[in-house]
Image (spheres, helix red, strand yellow):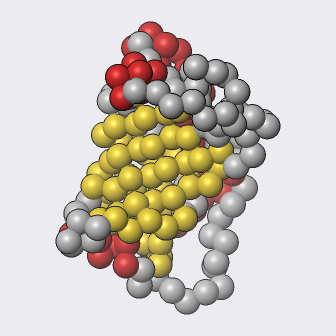
Amino acid sequence: MTDQPNEYVPITRVQTIELEAEASPDDAERVKPQVLEFIQGRGAPFFAFLTTLRKDGRPHCRPVSTFVEGWTVGTISQDVHLKNQHIRNNPVVGYLWVEQCPPPGIRPKSVWMQGLCEIIDDPQEIAEFYRRREAALGRGDTHADEEWKRLLLRTRPQLVRAEGFLGRLKPALYRTFD
């Protein structure tokens, strides 16, 4: 095999599984703070996407903004969006954060989170979310003058898979979050 990022070298399925083997628990724990900082927006800029499931099981993916407190993800949604009905039908969602501009020749860092989402429609709780986000990131309600009903999508993780923090093809997996 080669380390050249743009050169394709076919490998067997067994080699692929060996290369993509989960990082050791010690290695994963060592980079856990970096992974959290990344999804909290304190590192490289990223794109964030939310995946929900339609009633028939087909995925629905949308770009979103996120505010991560601890490992809990908050996303504001308009009440008319399809993703809200998907979550009401099935609260299992996925978030994907992908680094926007990795160094040349380096694969972007990415973090996949599977979690359980609850929809919060209490205006006071949503206003408090905006206050916390503004204190942390300088961004409050960026659509304050618009007349749509805001919902807070609050997701607690079940599984996180982080790639690019321990080198190429060495994902760190997390199943506990403190």
Where's residue 112, x and y in %?
45, 43
Q: Furthest residue to the bottom?
A: 147
Q: Nearer the viewer, residue 19 or 128?
A: 19
Label count reads 0
Q: Furthest residue to the right?
A: 104
Tell me the residue at 49%/13% (across/down): 27
Q: Which quadrant does the C terminus fall into? A: top left
Would residue 31 be found to the left or right of residue 26 on screen?
right
Q: Furthest residue to the top?
A: 26
Where's residue 63, x and y in %?
55, 65
Q: Which of 155 and 89 is in front in this view?
A: 89
Tell me the residue at 21%/72% (across/down): 55
Tell me the residue at 51%/58% (across/down): 49
> Can residue 96 be seen in this snapshot?
yes
Q: Nearer the viewer, residue 21 or 164?
A: 21
149 shown above or below 127: below
162 shown above or below 82: above
Where's residue 132, x and y in %?
58, 53
Q: Which quadrant does the N terminus fall into? A: top right
Tell me the residue at 34%/37% (across/down): 159
Would residue 164 be found to the left or right of residue 45 on screen?
left
Q: Which of 167 and 10 is in front in this view?
A: 10
165 shown above or below 158: above
> Can residue 121 be seen in this snapshot?
no
